[in-house]
Amino acid sequence: MNLSSIKTQDLQPDAESASPADNAGKKLGMWLFLYTEIILFGGLFVLYAVYLKLYASDFAEGAQELNKIFGVVNTVILLISSFAVAASITAIQKNERGIALFSLGTALLCGAVFLVNKYFEWGHKISHGIYPNSDKLVDGPAGQNLFFGLYYVITGLHGVHIVIGMTLLAVSLVFVLRGRISSGSYALLDNAGLYWHLVDLIWIFIFPLFYLVI
């Protein structure tokens, strides 16, 4: 056997075979990051629960000011977007790039519609003087001022996370388009999907807490 015939690249580990371990490390890092996000929103939900116990009737009256139709529509939109993201990951694993691109585009469209709905919902409330420390709330029950304060903080923070998630999905879409994300290397898309699913899950908690208070 002629040792000189052995190419240098033959001695290097195959990039695709090394990707599972690399992907696992990146996914672990993403899970650790998501854990901090859970702690953040979990703390806000605990604060909400404390004030709900103290001002149950005021919170129930505040919830009546929110448009449940907007809440339901946004919930459905995010559920559809989560399905689309999951479909994009499955598609890229099967080397179906066209389906992956379509699914990511659908998820991005859903995210944009969600933000537009939230913009109009916030605008409607603010135009009617319903925002933290407004004259209408300051002169009213203390519990309602707290309710809407938490509403704007939590939904606003969630909106920021929607924007971050859309950015990750948009970058993933570009990488899929350029072939940088494929069946052999899709850690970025996988992690973007995990982040997006968490954002959607958080909304599943937000919706009943603010829109369905009895």
Image: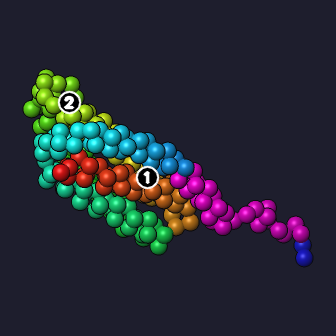
- Residue drawn at x 84%, y 69% as measured from the top left: 5
Relative to 163, residue 15 above or below: below
As shown in the figure, which amino acid type bears the numbered disc 2? Answer: Ala
Question: Residue 11, position in %: x, y?
Answer: 79, 64
Using residue 20 as the reference point, say whether residue 1 is left or right of it: right
Quadrant hosting residue 161 = top left
Q: How is the image coloured?
A: rainbow
Q: Can residue 19 be seen in this view?
A: no
Question: Residue 190, position in %: x, y?
Answer: 48, 59
Q: Is residue 3 visible?
A: yes
Q: Mark 1 points at which residue?
A: 195
Q: Tell me the SS state at disc 2.
A: helix
Relative to 144, residue 166 above or below: below
Q: Tell me the SS state at disc 1.
A: helix
Quadrant hosting residue 99 = bottom left
Q: Label 2 crowding class (10 Å Cα cut-off): few <14, some 14-19, many 20+?
A: some
Outermost residue on the front side: it is: 54
- Residue drawn at x 14%, y 42% as measured from the top left: 61
Closer to the eye: label 2 or 1? 2
- Residue 37 or residue 167, whichever sits in front: 37
Q: Residue 162 carries which label?
A: none
89 falls in the magenta region:
no
Using residue 113 as the reference point, say whether residue 4 is left or right of it: right
Q: Name the residue under label 2.
A: 142
Q: Which of marks 2 and 1 is nearer the N terminus?
A: 2
- Residue drawn at x 28%, y 62% as measured from the top left: 80
Question: Residue 195, position in %: x, y?
Answer: 43, 52
- Give how far apart the Cα atoms at labels 2 and 1 are: 35 Å
Question: Residue 194, position in %: x, y?
Answer: 45, 56
As shown in the figure, which amino acid type bears the numbered disc 1? Answer: Tyr
Q: What's the magenta region?
A: 3-31
